[in-house]
Amino acid sequence: MLSATEKTLLAEIWARLTPVAEDIGSDALHRMFTTFPGSKVYFSHLDISPRSAHLLSHGKKIVLAIAEGAKDISQLTVTLAPLQTLHAYLLRIDPHNFKLFSHCVLVALAVHLGDDFTHVAHAAMDKYLSAFAAVLTEKYR
């Protein structure tokens, strides 16, 4: 799946992005809600306008969870176990939304990182986010 070099690159990228987790997360969420309006159903009770407090708060939580998982990808299932249960059993999020959100995260990262988001970084991030989404959906099976 991910090479040792890719794992190191991902850890470096997420360490760099942790201080701006709110910005990356809220941008990715806003992109998802705009591009895939059906994904808003789970957030109908919140203010999801650009840069709203709800979007910033939830975006930060998501990005920090993604960054935490990148610290030790070999333990991703263990790291995400509480989120698996929350999303599958309590929130009942459509698992397809994880793939949609992953795509939006890639776009947000490209915008935020600019030229630093190289083709190597993009490929590694895409692999990681695919694995992240797959782990989140394991409880749905």
Image (spheres, rainbow, N blue to C red):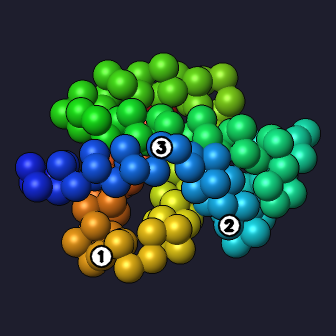
**Does label 2 or label 3 sit earlier along the sequence?**
3
On the image, the x and y values in percent for residue 129 come to 38, 53
On the image, the x and y values in percent for residue 109 come to 48, 65
Looking at the picture, tell me which residue is in the foreground, 28 or 95. 28
Taking the image as drawn, is residue 110 in sight?
A: yes
Say which amino acid is labelled 3. Thr
On the image, the x and y values in percent for residue 39 come to 72, 55
> Residue 132, which numbered label?
none
Give left or right: position of 61 versus 114. right
Quickly name the residue at label 3.
18
Task: Kindly identify the residue that appears in the image at 46 percent across and 51 percent down.
Answer: 17
**Does label 2 or label 1 sit earlier along the sequence?**
2
On the image, the x and y values in percent for residue 125 come to 33, 60
Check the picture and name the quadrant holding the C terminus: top left
Q: Quadrant of residue 127?
A: bottom left
Task: Kindly identify the residue that appears in the image at 52 percent across and 44 percent down.
Answer: 19
Task: Kindly identify the residue that appears in the image at 45 percent across and 76 percent down.
Answer: 114
Say which amino acid is labelled 2. Arg
> Residue 31, which numbered label?
2
Residue density around tag 3, few if under 14, some if 14–19, many if 20 or more, within 10 Å: some
Task: Say if mark 2 contacts mark 1, CB within 8 Å.
Answer: no
Looking at the picture, tell me which residue is in the foreground, 83 or 69. 69
Task: Say if mark 2 contacts mark 3, CB within 8 Å.
Answer: no
Residue density around tag 2, few if under 14, some if 14–19, many if 20 or more, within 10 Å: many
* SS assignment at label 3: helix
> Residue 118, which numbered label?
1
